[in-house]
Image (cartoon, grey):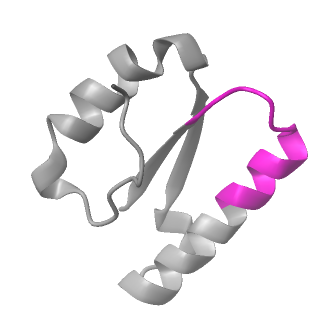
Amino acid sequence: MPHVEIKCFPGRTEEQKMRCAEEVTKAITETMGCDASSVSVAIKEIDKAEWKDKVFDPQIVAEEASLYKKPGYTCD
């Protein structure tokens, strides 16, 4: 039962978020061999001013060992 949580800055349309969720679901079903009905996708908008405290430090830096795709930026 894969669950994906995408965090991004605000500004995408509902149509863009739906398409993203559909494409992520497609990639998961193809690569992990599961049914689309087993996949859930959440998209949470985080303000740029809060990104470092709410996402970068606690979920990227602190959980670096579990990242399969690391970002090409820092929040210094």
Residue in the foreground of this view, choosing between 13 and 74: 74
Image location (x, y in percent) of residue 60:
27, 40
Residue in the foreground of this view, choosing between 66 and 24: 66
Q: Is residue 10 above or below residue 3?
A: above
Left or right: residue 13 versus residue 3 is: right
Res. 35 in view? no
Image location (x, y in percent) of residue 22:
70, 64
Quarter of image, res 57? top left
31 magenta-colored: no
Task: Identify the image quadrant of the N terminus.
Answer: bottom left
- Tell me which segment is drawn in magenta: 8-21
Write the residue at 32% across / 57% down.
Answer: 70
Write the residue at 38% across / 61% down.
Answer: 2
14 magenta-colored: yes
Residue in the foreground of this view, choosing between 42 and 69: 69
Image location (x, y in percent) of residue 21:
66, 57
| Residue most extreme to the front | 76
Left or right: residue 62 versus residue 8 is: left
Image location (x, y in percent) of residue 52:
38, 21
Q: In this view, does 33 lie above or below 28?
A: below
Write the residue at 43% across / 80% down.
Answer: 34
Task: Identify the image quadrant of the C terminus.
Answer: top left
Left or right: residue 8 versus residue 31 is: right
Left or right: residue 36 versus residue 13 is: left
